[in-house]
Image: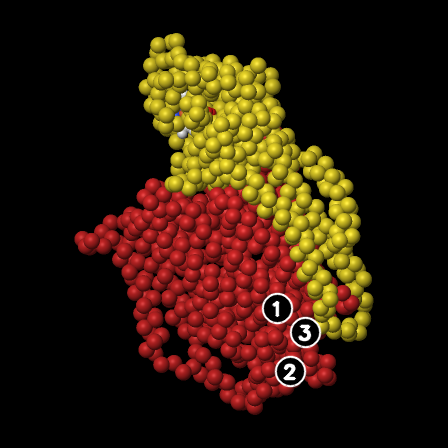
Chain colours: A yellow, B red
Amino acid sequence: MMNRWQYFKRLAPLMAIMALVLAACGREDLSTLNPQGPVAEEQFDLMVTAIVIMSLVIVVVFAICLYVIIRFRRRKGDKSIPKQVEGSHKLEIVWTVIPIILLIILGVPTVQSVFNLAKDYSNDPDAVKVIVTSHQYWWEFEYPELGIKTAQELVIPTGKTIWIEAKTADVLHSFWIPSLAGKIDTNPGGNTNYMYFSAPKEGVYLGKCAELCGPSHGLMDFKVKSVDPASFDRWATAIKEPVALPSDPAIAEVFESKCLTCHAVGAFGGPAFPNLTGIGSRESVAGILVNVEADDKQYEHEDTVYNNLYKWIKDPEAVKPGNLMSNQYDLTDEEIEGIAQYLSELTLDFEQ
Amino acid sequence: MDWLTTVDHKKIGILYLIAGGFFFLVGGLEAILIRIQLWKPQNDFVGADTYNELLTMHGTTMIFLAAMPVIFALMNAVIPLQIGARDVAFPFVNSLGFWTFLFGGILLNVSWIVGDVPDAGWTAYAPLAGSTYSNDHGMDYYVLGLQIAGIGTLIGGINFLVTIINMRAPGMTFMRMPMFTWSAFITSALILFAFPALTVGLAALMFDRLFEANFFDPSAGGNAVLWEHIFWIFGHPEVYILILPAFGIISEVISTFSRKRLFGYSSMVFATILIGFLGFMVWAHHMFTTGLGPVANALFSIATMLIAVPTGIKIFNWLFTMWGGSISFKSPNLFAVGFIPTFVMGGVTGVMLAAAPADFQYHDSYFVVAHFHYVIVGGLVLGLFSGVHYWWPKMFGRILNEGLAQLTFWTFFIGFHLTFFVQHFLGLMGMPRRIWQYLDGLGFNEMNLISTIGALLMGLGTIIFLINVVVTSVKPKNAPADPWEDGRTLEWTIPSPPPEYNFAQTPLVRGYDAYWKEKQDGHSGMTPAEPLGPIHMPSPSILPFFMGLGFFIAGFGFMYAPDWGHFLGTDLTVGHAIGIVGLLMVLICMLLRSVIDDHGFHIEEDEIKRDLGGKA
Ligand code: HEM
Ligand SMILES: [Cu+2]
């Protein structure tokens, strides 16, 4: 018992150092090593426990290994024959029992956490319920209680528990928000999955698809935008307000006939593909073309909302190979410009 | 011609080595292309489709067409010698196993020529692998190629089981068997139980794809998660099928080059059996995020962690085999010693992955890529390199150039760690696996670049190895019977390469490490267990080759049955007709095999005496 104690005492500072080192790793909005919410924190703690135990094992094995290969290397011309040892029951029991103890130290919190993360919030009136449906290669977010359907950007209130119901419309995908919650697969058919998480801090967190789903799998990103509850309510109201079609009747005409066959804005159009209501205030177009101010452009995939929209509508295939929007319509440059202009101004003013 | 008809286990071993080595190069080339694509963000070196094809073929080729066959190469070359047998139990079946593997592998790779390449990952998850979402012939190549290659593996495994059970020399009890033979035995048992699951899965997927069945199609009442279960019930034991032989090789090599008996032999045997058994109990740890519920996740977490215990026993037994020994760092041992820490690193990340809630973060990220490459490349491939360098003189009668071998080790070893160590962090920092591009500015760039440089270095190591093979093969065949001078097991008692009949007289085994024991007792060789006499040998046969070819033709025909027109105005399509011709070919070969009364031949006493005299 005494031994165990000392062991833990020695482990604690190691854990702390480890946590510090690891936490410095990666972007706050993306890295699992930099958790931003209680669920990811719980997973991170388990990871640190495991990493500490495993580092210990590695250190011991490496030490023995180094010692052995230095101490017992054959000298030149050495013809002597070492003692042929059969084994040692004592030693063998030692290295059976120690791993078992280590596994118990890791196994207990694992099992606790498995059940903890499987908690059911479906009947919690405080939780925000979201039905996530994955599609090749975009994400649909439906808030059944609020009557909202949006795409690519999951807006959530800070602090509230978000209760996710995850499904897919086509092949397997996996819904992953590294800095907030880990992941859950989206299965076809009746195999619906559930997951919960929350984000205490405001911010935009990156989400990814984590199951091979076709050529653009790696580009199937989404954003989780956590805003204060008041802003969230304003967003929920704003997104349901009526939306005007483009003021230029010619543009309105092509927009209706070429785009709204698949997409929806406000009460217009069809629900099959990403809902475009409020697209002008999203963080990105198509999940990967990140919207920035013209002066802030740093990377190839960043540009202004307008430019991103233009680029996407002009040639979706060049942005996301294999997506279902490619080759579905024929537009002149002027029409694309008009539509991009209109969509870039289709904003929702909700953040305080 | 001799090579097409041979049923000699040593020659089949060499055939496996050549074919497996070739597919290693193909898979390696695919890997290098993948790494070139990922060396910088948003690279357009290959297209998104091509990337997924490379990825799928890399995984499939490496597991089924490279690693397995090279393991089979060593098993074929060594097992009968280690147990004092003249061949495997069913030499004809052994040859059939090789040819079905080879033709299956070729069929899979014909897809590159045709241009319809499998692209749903080596795990071929439904529905992406089904005909709705993969509607070219790519996945058909996967299904049929693997099905045919799988026949070869399954019958190969059964053959080794029977061989090891029935053909051990007198005195070679189970508890005196060399560790490599033990691991081959357990591996074969795993093959026997795991491969039928794959066969069933592939057959069901084939029905889905070729005949519009709906096993895995949820829109028609099928279940996609079912495929995951079937695949991993095969797939998890498969990774133990791969790693156990490496454990066996390491045990042999470490003990030989430390001049010491394996520490804790009986616990090693026990650990191997336990790992094999637990290997079947943990398949769902690949499915923690599939949504099996907390009870299943908890159980499979714990079961998976348990595997660390027998694995740990092995690691420490190796370390204590070296402890107090006289360790020589000739190339086989260099690889073996490099294996230990590397494999430990792969093992500990395995335990980390076993913690289900943490796996919600690791799963399908680069962390997983790092983990399984540490086990498969850092473990298995280092093990195979070790085994190949170790037994090369026995197989070919020539010792590989030591300088080049050392150079191979260092480039490969350093390249390996450069490639895969950083990937742990990439994964933890949020990089999913199987992605064609990553965006700039996420902090992934530098590590991916390092990884690519490492991969090129590994490629260089492989090239040095190939140069070594060429350089060595022009040297005279003069390897002694016991080239490492500290050989402990039976294969080192006979000439390198061994005569066709292996043992002029079956040896009498008087203890564990039979040859070592005789040497310690001051004898120069084994005591024979039988008088010198004519040796009965099986005849060579071309039938296995044609059976493999028949399967190949059949697979090809059925795959294209829906595309090609009808056959002479009948209901049958041309594809069906070709398929039937292929199957008929197989059946006729089977018939011939049954009706031809072939008693084999004898090698006469005079000839054996001449061999013995020549060597003495
Ligand atoms: C010219 C008219 C169209 C416009 C302006 C338009 C606009 C857009 C935009 C802006 C996105 C990205 C959504 C986001 O980031 O939230 C998108 C995605 C998408 N659109 Fe369209 N669209 C048009 C026509 C179509 C048509 C006709 C189809 C269907 C046949 C279609 C199918 C899709 C699909 C499947 C995606 C998701 C692609 C992915 O992210 O993988 N679109 N569209
Ligand atoms: Cu995906």
**Quadrant placement of the C terminus of chain B:** bottom right
Point 35% across, 59% down: residue: B553
B372 over A313 or under it: above or below: below
Q: Position of residue A157 (x, y in %)?
A: 54, 23
Looking at the rendered structure, the secondary structure element under dot 2 is loop
Q: Nearer the viewer, mark 3 or mark 2?
A: 2
The residue that label 2 is drawn on is B510
- Circle 2: residue type: Arg
* Sequence-first tag of 1 and 3: 1
Give how far apart the Cα atoms at labels 3 and 2 are.
16 Å
Give how far apart the Cα atoms at labels 1 and 3 are.
20 Å
Comparing B349 with B487, the one in front is B349
A50 over B539 or under it: above or below: above
The residue that label 1 is drawn on is B269
Comparing B364 with B337, the one in front is B364
Looking at the rendered structure, the secondary structure element under dot 3 is loop
Comparing A248 with B464, the one in front is A248
Instruction: Confirm or deny contact between disc 1 and disc 3 (CB under 8 A).
Output: no
Label 2 marks a residue whose chain is: B
Give how far apart the Cα atoms at labels 2 and 1 are.
19 Å
Q: How dense is the environment of label 3, judged by Cα within 10 Å: few (below 14), some, or many (20 and up)?
A: many
